Amino acid sequence: MISIFLVLLTSGFLLYKFLRPPNALHSAENTGETVKQKPVLDLHPQIQPNVKPIDPAFLQHHFMKKSIKSMANTNE
Amino acid sequence: MVTIFALTVFFIIWRPFGINESIPTSIAAACILLLGIVPFKDVLTIFEAVSGASITILSTIVMSIVLESIGFFRWAAINLALKSRGSGVLLFWYIILLCFLMTLFFNNDGSILITTPIIIQTLSLLRLKPAQQVPYLISGALVATAASAPIGVSNLANLIALKIVGLDLNSYATMMFVPSMVGIACIAVLLYVYFKKDIPITFQNHSKPKDLNNLLSEYPTKKLSHPLAAKTLGQENIDWKMFRICIGVVVLTRISFFALAPFGIPTEWPAIIGAILLIMIRWYKKKIGAKDILKKSPWHILLFAFSMYVIIYGLHNVGLTAVIVDELGGAVAKDPFYAIFITGMLLTVLSNVCNNLPSIMIGTFSIKEMGLSLQTMQVAYLANVIGADIGSLILPMGTLATLLWFYTLRQYKIPMNWGKYLRVTLFVIPVSLALSLLSLYVWTTYFVF
C-alpha cells in the first residue's frame, strides 16, 4: 500500500508540474511585475505619429485675455 | 435477447442525432424487464452492484469539471510547448506522460476529453499542420485509455466487476500495477518506433522558456480555446494558493481510496467528499455556485451502468455465459497461464465487437461460474481487465473513450479515419497485450501469490 502512495505522490507532483502556470508568471507575481502580451497594433518603425503643432495665434489669443495673477491662481 | 443486445450495441456506436448512449441501453433494459428475462426483484440487487462504481466515476468527473471551470488545465498546452524546447521527440514523451497522469488521477473518458484539446492547442502553438498532429494525438489517446488499467479507480468497467471476484482496490493494485505498466510502456515504445519518421526532430517555431510572451500572444484564444475556458490567458491574476490546494485535494482523494479501503469504506465516499471540497473551495475563492456542475455533470452514467448491467444479466439468464463456461471452462481451469491468456484474448475479441463495458461484465459472470479456485479466478479477472483496457484499443468502438476521441477530433477538423487508426493499433496493441498478459502471469505467480 505504501508503494501505491509513493506512486500517487510522485505522479501528483509531476501532474502539478505539467498543469501549473509557467515559472515566468510565478516570478512576475513575486516581483510585482506583469507578463506583457505583444501589442495588438504593432506600428512599422518608419511610420511617424501624425501630430500637428499648436497654432501660436491660438495660444496668444488664449493667454492675452488673462492677467499674470489670474494665471498664477489657476496654475496655468 | 441477442437481437436486443446487438441493436443496443449498434445504437451506442452509431449514436444517431448524437443521442446519449444511455438512451438505447435504457430502452433495451426496459424491454428486458418487461419481457421478464430479468425479474423485477433483481433490480435492487443490480442497482446496489453498480451504484458505488458509478458514483465514484461521476464524482471524479465532477472534480474535473470544477477544475476546468477555474482554468486549472489552461496552462498545460503552454507548459508542453515550453518544456519540449523545440524537440519533437521530447514533446512526444511529455504528451505520453501527461495523458498517463491525467488518467491516473481522473478517469479514461475524462482524460480523453481534457487532454485532446490540450494536445491540439500545443501542436497549434508549435505550428504543426493537422496531418502532422496525428502521431501525437493517436499516441496520447492510446496511452490515456490504456492507463486506466494500473489502478482500479480510473475506469468504470474495472470498478463494477471488482466486488464480484472478491478483490479490493489495494489487492487489485498489488497484482495489476506492474503488468499493466509493462503493457503501457510497450505501447509507448512501439508508438515511438511506428511514428519515429513522422515526428519532427525540431520545430521551426522553437520555444524556449523565455519565449512565454510570444506563446501568450500567439495563443489561439478563440479558435482553439478549451471548450470550458473562461478568460484570456495572461489577463488575470493567478491564484497560486488555490492552485496548490486544488491539486492537493485531487492527490489526497486518490490516496484516500487506497488508505480507506482496508477499513471497509467504499470508494464512493472519499470521491464524494473530494468533489464537495473542490466545489466549496471554488465557491469560497471565486464565488461560483454549483449550478454549472448540476448542468454539466454526466448524471446519465448511473442510468447507463444500471441498464447495461440489466442487459448483461439478461444475456446471462438466457445462457450466453453458460456457452462460454462450457466451451472454455475446462481450459481456463487447467492452469493460471491458460486462464490468463484465454480470458484476456476472449475479452479482447468481445470488447472490439461489442464495447468493453458489457464485455467485462460477460467475462466476469463467466469466470465466476467456471468453478475456479480463488487465485485462478482473480488472475482470470485481471486478464479480463487487460483485455478490456488494452486489447479493446484495436478498434475505435472497443471503448467509449476512443469513440469520444474520434468525436473530439471531428470537432477540431483533424483528419482521422478508422483505417489510419487501425494501421497503428494493429502494430502496437497485439504485442503490448501479449506482453501484459505474460507479465501478469509472471508477476502474480512468482511475486504475489
Image: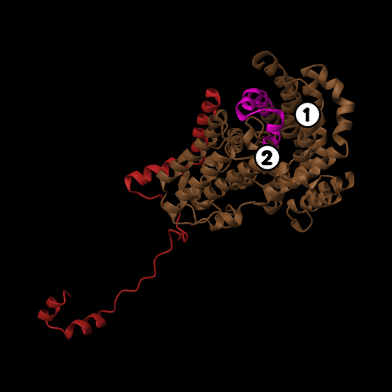
Chain colours: A red, B brown
Q: Which mark is residue B156?
A: 2
Which residue, given by chain and number where applicable, does mark 1 sit on?
B368
Q: Is residue B366 visible?
A: yes
Q: Is residue B165 magenta?
A: yes
Locate the N terminus of chain B and report the quarter of the image it occupies.
top right
* Residue B269 left/right relative to B426: left
Q: Residue furthest front?
A: B41
Q: Residue at x 62, y 31 (%)?
A: B151
Q: Which mark is residue B224?
A: none
Q: Position of residue B303 (x, y in %)?
A: 70, 50
Which of the two residues, A67 or B301, is positioned nearer the viewer here? B301
Which of the two residues, B81 or A58, is positioned nearer the viewer here? B81
Residue range in magenta is B158-185
Dot 2: chain letter: B
Q: Position of residue B447 (x, y in %)?
A: 65, 15
Q: Is residue B221 magenta?
A: no
Dot 1: chain letter: B
Q: Is residue B235 visible?
A: no
Q: Position of residue B199 (x, y in %)?
A: 66, 36
* Residue B163 left/right relative to B392: left
* Residue B203 left/right relative to B240: right
Q: Position of residue B109 (x, y in %)?
A: 66, 43
Which of the two residues, A30 or A3, is positioned nearer the viewer here? A3
B177 is higher (above) or lower (below) than B400: above
Q: Main secondary structure of the magenta part?
A: helix
Q: Residue at x 34, y 44 (%)?
A: A30
> Which amino acid, by three-letter code, is at mark 2?
Leu
Locate the C terminus of chain B and report the quarter of the image it occupies.
top right
**Mark 1 element type:** helix
B423 is higher (above) or lower (below) than B1: above
